[in-house]
Image: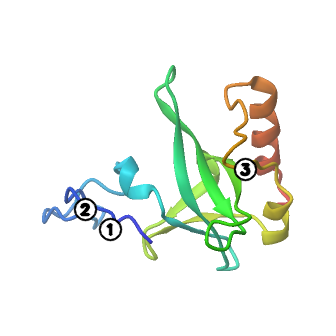
Amino acid sequence: MNYNDKDQYGIYKNSSMHANGNMGPGPGLMGAETLLGNDVYNHRDEKIGDIKEIMLDMSGGKISYAVLSFGSFLGMGEKLFAVPWNALILDTENKRFTLDIEKDRLENAPGFDKDNWPDMADSTWRELIHSYYSNKTL
C-alpha cells in the first residue's frame, strides 16, 4: 500500500505544481495517517515490511520511530521493529519507503511483539536501536 491510496482528505491531490515538480504538500510535509501501512523495501528491492505505527516525541515535537512489521503471515508470527525515522528514505517514484538493511540483519534486529512493547523513552533502549540502525554494515 502507498500514501496515495490512503489519502482520504485529498492531501496529495492538489492541482498546484510545486517548483520541485510535486503536487500538494508531499513529500516535504505528509499526513501521518497516509503513511501507516506503507511498504518498506531494502536496497535490493526486497519487501521487508510495512509501517504499522509512527511514534512521536511529544516533548520535542518530532517523529522518533516508525514501527515496522516483518515476517508475518496473516498477522501470525509478526515481529515488530522500531526503526529510527531518519533511517527511512521516502521513495517518491515507487511511493514507498526504503531502509538500507539486509533482510537477515533485520530478522536479527531488536524487536518485540504487539503484546510486549518496549519503553521507547528509555535512553538505554534508544541508544541500542539507534546504534543498530546507524551501523555501516546494514
Q: Type of residue at label 2?
A: Tyr
Residue pictured at 37% horizontal, 51% vertical: 33
- Judging by the rendered image, the residue that carries numbered circle 1 is 4
Label 1 residue SS: loop
Where is residue 32? Give x, y as percent: 39, 48
Where residue 61 is drawn, which disc sits there? none
- Please name whichever residue, 97 or 20, is drawn nearer the observer in this view of the structure: 97
Disc 1 and disc 3 in contact, CB within 8 angstroms: no
Label 3 residue SS: loop
Disc 1 and disc 2 in contact, CB within 8 angstroms: yes
Is the residue marked by circle 2 packed among few (<14), some (14-19), or many (20+) residues within 10 Å? some
Q: Type of residue at label 3?
A: Asp
Label 2 residue SS: loop
Total tally of numbered discs in the picture: 3
Residue pictured at 86% horizontal, 59% vertical: 108
Q: Could you tell whether 29 is left or right of 77 in the image?
A: left
Locate the C terminus and report the quarter of the image it occupies: bottom right
Q: Quadrant of residue 102?
A: bottom right
- Judging by the rendered image, the residue that carries numbered circle 3 is 113
Q: Earlier in the sequence, mark 3 or mark 2?
A: 2
Is the residue marked by circle 1 packed among few (<14), some (14-19), or many (20+) residues within 10 Å? some
Q: Quadrant of residue 7?
A: bottom left
- Please name whichever residue, 44 or 112, is drawn nearer the observer in this view of the structure: 112
Q: Type of residue at label 1?
A: Asn
Where residue 12 is drawn, which disc sits there? 2
Q: Could you tell whether 125 is left or right of 91 in the image?
A: right
Q: Tell us which disc is closer to us: 3 or 2.
A: 3
Inter-mark Cα distance, 3 to 2 = 33 Å
